[in-house]
Image (tube, rainbow, N blue to C red):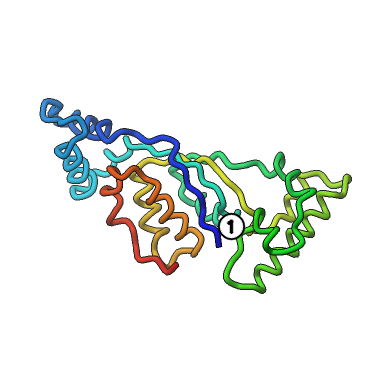
């Protein structure tokens, strides 16, 4: 099964966070401009001493592709983030003339699982949706109510480091939905290498 595709579009430099921390103690003269001293300071204050509001100065923006609407619902429970999601109202036209006669051809539109019965039911639901879209009397606004939960979507997602730690702690855990486990690990791997040390302890043991 294809993994979600994650593109990091933008991130805040670490020195912005260390600058914010040093503002509290007026210790800007001790900064090494985002070097090891500043990196250690961010970890010590934000993670060890739990003054985690300082981590909110770090922001990340990701382009997330290839997750299901079911996974999107799970993701949307993390409220301290910004979401711009592909509109089903304007983009369902791509399904109208597509070949979705087999699971292989339909996989461009739906997230497949390791359960064949579920996959076959998803394929049938997708084909039913296509029939509705080909009926000129049914608008996209109405047809989308028949979209299966497995329908693939994409979004631009922005989140601060404090909220991202919470997301990764909950969603990389083996008890989380398997698809959002995939997403959590893919997001962690998309982080800048120099930022990952802030999130290492958030990553749980995955079941996938």
Q: Where is residue 45 in the image (x, y as percent from the top left)?
A: 19, 43
Q: Is residue 145 left or right of residue 81?
A: right
Q: Would you say 20 lies left or right of 188 here?
A: left
Q: Which residue is drawn at 34% across and 34% down?
A: 12
**Does 144 sit left or right of 10 as displayed?**
right
Label tally: 1
Could you say which quadrant of the image residue 104 lies in? bottom right
**Residue 182 image position (x, y, % from top left):** 46, 59
Where residue 3 appears, x then y in whole percent? 51, 57
Q: Is residue 129 above or below residue 162?
A: below
Element marked by disc 1: helix
State whether residue 35 is above or below residue 149.
above
Front residue of this view, candidates 145 and 29 = 29
The relative height of residue 79 versus residue 117 in the rendered view (above or below) is above
Task: Give coordinates of residue 93: x percent, y percent.
Answer: 75, 43
Viewer-closest of 61 and 165 = 61
Dot 1, how many residues are within 10 Å of its Cα: few (below 14), some (14-19), or many (20+)? some
**If the image is split into quadrants, where does the N terminus sit?**
bottom right
Q: Name the residue under label 1.
A: 70
Residue at x-position 70% and y-position 69%: 120
Which residue corresponds to the image point at 45% horizontal and 36% vertical from the top-left? 9
Dividing the image into 4 quarters, which one contains the C terminus?
bottom left
Report which quarter residue 155 is drawn in: top right
């Amino acid at each position: 099964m294809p993994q979600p595709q994650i593109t990091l579009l933008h991130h805040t430099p670490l020195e912005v966070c260390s600058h914010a921390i040093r503002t509290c103690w007026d210790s800007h003269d001790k900064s090494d401009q985002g070097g090891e001293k500043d990196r250690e300071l961010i970890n010590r204050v934000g993670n060890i001493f739990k003054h985690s509001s300082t981590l909110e100065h770090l922001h990340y923006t990701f382009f997330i592709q290839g997750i299901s609407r079911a996974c999107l619902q799970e993701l949307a429970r993390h409220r301290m983030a910004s979401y711009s999601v592909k509109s089903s109202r304007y983009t369902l036209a791509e399904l109208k003339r597509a070949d979705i006669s087999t699971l292989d051809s339909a996989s461009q539109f739906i997230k497949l699982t390791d359960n064949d019965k579920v996959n076959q039911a998803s394929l049938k639901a997708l084909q039913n949706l296509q029939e509705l879209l080909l009926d000129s009397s049914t608008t996209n606004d109405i047809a989308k109510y028949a979209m299966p939960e497995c329908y693939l979507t994409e979004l631009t997602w922005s989140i601060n480091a404090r909220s991202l730690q919470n997301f990764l702690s909950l969603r990389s855990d083996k008890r989380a939905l398997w698809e959002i486990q995939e997403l959590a690990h893919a997001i962690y791997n998309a982080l800048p290498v120099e930022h990952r040390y802030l999130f290492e302890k958030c990553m749980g043991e995955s079941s996938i």
